[in-house]
Image (cartoon, helix red, strand yellow):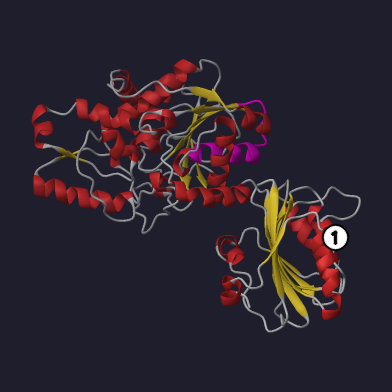
């Protein structure tokens, strides 16, 4: 959720004197003398930074679909289109070009979660150490001392900060009209320090909003407490911003110049990755999507229309194996899928009656995104259900709807255990499934197809297992366990023969025998 600017320590001379509360989208408050001095100090550095020997001026693009959906103008500063897919080469090169010849001759070393190292590298040796940037940083300092190398810091260095500030220089040149706020992801603080310094020097009315992952908010905690705070642990999903301790210089600049701070959770970041993909057909890394996620939250919180926001899409070094996770969690981040545990009586017709409640007659059918059930008790069944929703508050309304019709329901939409693990673990062996036969079916993903499938089955056939997950394809796949009386064997054969959907019997599959039967 959005967080107000953390309160400052009033005794600190770095305090800007601005209030800590969110004041809608009013222009940023006037800068204090201290803030003006910092912005002026870095303006010259940014204007003279050497970055374009290696970097390119990246586009500032309108996210058409997202803008239309939010009712505001969302501009993406496409740093993900740099040759190393990140802004980091700007600061790295500006630092390197300003090093003394003897420092370069000794050799250089850097610590990075990945992007700074790529921006820095012209060959060299890669050493993997630890689980976060902070772990790598400590190890790099040891190597620097042992081998007499020159350390190039990824964020806490004036030349690096100035190089990153050229991003803002391009933004103001590319869009000379009104800008209400610029949203910038924060890890160690180098990018937001450079961006804030340049914009506040030339356009102080533009708000600078810093965005951190909810589980890696070292800068927010530091500004709130008036001193740098070291986090014990950081989340690793947004690894590009997983920093336990922000820089001393970046803390000084950020505290003075950044107007507000926000946190973004994993689901919101995944939804933002999807949003940018739909507009650009590019896939951002989680850190690169934080600014977009924050714009969406900011617009919703303040109910804004017709404003102009810029998000710096700061990186696209995404691990391919994360994409499945991103695709699944994006629906939660967009509040488009709700999860439930529903208790259904083990009696004839109750399964179908519950399914009818999901899409009541006369209403637009709700899309079932997931359905997991395994017979386990003679009197009641626990069903794990995912349902597509269109608004945030709809999840609880659906839960109450099920309750009113006699189906005890737990809303699991915000439950991390359910989203991450339990949804994949529903099932197992059951002593109540004697004589069970297992079938896989495919059917077109159309509204009402699932109910038509259920209605075509004989009411005396006992469904002992049911698994369905919408994968976003044209065809849905269902795994069904059935106990069919011997007298209905011919009826089952007729049902399968006349069914318009492809099917395969899996009763003899060894995987089924090992884990489900």
Question: Which x, y percent locates residue 72?
Answer: 64, 28
> What is the magenta segment's predominant secondary structure?
helix
Q: Please tell me which residue lies in front, 128 or 242.
A: 128
Left or right of 277: which side holds 394? right
**Tag 1 residue:** 356
Based on the picture, tell me whether residue 293 belongs to the magenta stretch. Answer: yes
Q: Is residue 164 visible?
A: yes
Residue at the outermost right position: 362
Locate residue 90, reporting x and y percent: 32, 28
Picture quadrant of residue 117: top left
Q: What residue is rendered at 30% in x and 37% in y?
A: 118
Element class at badge 1: helix
Residue 401 seen: no
Q: Nearer the viewer, residue 187 or 2?
A: 187
* Image: 404 above or below 337: below
The vertical placement of 74 against 172, above or below, is below
Q: How many marks?
A: 1
Task: Identify the residue at horizontal 65%, vertical 68% (top origin).
Answer: 506
Whole-percent x, y for residue 195 in the image: 40, 29
Q: Nearer the viewer, residue 342 or 381?
A: 381
Q: What stretch of residues is rendered in magenta? A: 289-307
């Amino acid at each position: 959720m959005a967080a107000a600017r953390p309160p400052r320590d009033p005794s600190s001379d770095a305090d800007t004197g601005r209030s800590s509360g969110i004041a809608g989208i009013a222009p940023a408050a006037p800068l204090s003398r201290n803030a003006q001095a910092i912005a002026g100090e870095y303006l010259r550095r940014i204007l003279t930074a050497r970055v374009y020997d290696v970097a390119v001026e990246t586009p500032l693009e309108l996210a058409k679909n997202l803008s239309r959906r939010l009712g505001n103008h969302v501009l993406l500063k496409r740093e993900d289109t740099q040759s190393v897919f990140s802004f980091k080469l700007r600061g790295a090169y500006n630092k390197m070009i300003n090093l003394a010849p003897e420092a370069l001759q000794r050799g250089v070393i850097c610590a990075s979660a990945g992007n700074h190292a790529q921006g820095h590298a012209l060959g060299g040796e890669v050493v993997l150490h630890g689980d976060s940037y902070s772990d790598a940083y400590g190890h790099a300092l040891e190597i620097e001392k042992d081998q007499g190398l020159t350390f190039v810091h990824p964020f806490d260095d004036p030349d690096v900060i100035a190089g990153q500030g050229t991003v803002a220089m391009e933004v103001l040149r590319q869009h000379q009209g009104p800008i209400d706020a610029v949203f910038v992801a924060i890890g160690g603080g180098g990018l937001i320090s450079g961006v804030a310094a340049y914009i506040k020097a030339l356009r102080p009315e533009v708000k600078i909003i810093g965005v951190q992952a909810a589980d890696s908010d070292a800068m927010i905690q530091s500004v709130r407490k008036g001193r740098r705070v070291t986090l014990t642990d950081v989340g690793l999903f947004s690894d590009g911003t997983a920093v336990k301790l922000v820089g001393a210089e970046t803390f000084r600049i950020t505290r003075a110049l950044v107007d507000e701070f926000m946190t973004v959770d994993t689901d919101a970041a995944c939804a933002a990755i999807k949003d940018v993909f739909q507009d650009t057909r590019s896939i951002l890394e989680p850190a690169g999507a934080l600014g977009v996620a924050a714009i969406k939250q900011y617009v919703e919180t303040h109910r804004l229309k017709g404003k102009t926001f810029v998000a710096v899409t700061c990186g696209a070094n995404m691990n391919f194996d994360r994409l499945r996770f991103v695709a699944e969690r994006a629906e939660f981040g967009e509040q488009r899928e709700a999860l439930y545990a529903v208790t259904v009586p083990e009696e004839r017709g109750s399964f179908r009656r519950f399914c009818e409640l999901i899409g009541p007659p006369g209403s637009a059918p709700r899309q079932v995104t997931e359905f997991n059930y395994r017979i386990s008790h003679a009197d009641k069944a626990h069903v794990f259900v995912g349902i597509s929703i269109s608004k945030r508050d709809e999840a609880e309304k659906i839960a109450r709807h099920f309750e009113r019709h006699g189906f005890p329901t737990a809303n699991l939409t915000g439950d991390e255990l359910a989203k991450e693990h339990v949804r994949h673990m529903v099932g197992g062996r059951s002593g109540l499934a004697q004589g069970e036969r297992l079938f896989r079916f495919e059917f077109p993903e159309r509204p009402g197809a699932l109910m038509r499938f259920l209605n075509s089955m004989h009411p005396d056939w006992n469904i002992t297992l049911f698994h369905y997950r919408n994968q976003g394809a044209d065809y849905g796949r269902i795994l069904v366990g059935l106990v069919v009386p011997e007298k209905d064997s011919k009826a089952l054969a007729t049902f399968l023969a006349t069914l318009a959907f492809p099917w395969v019997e899996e009763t003899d599959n060894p995987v089924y025998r090992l884990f489900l039967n």
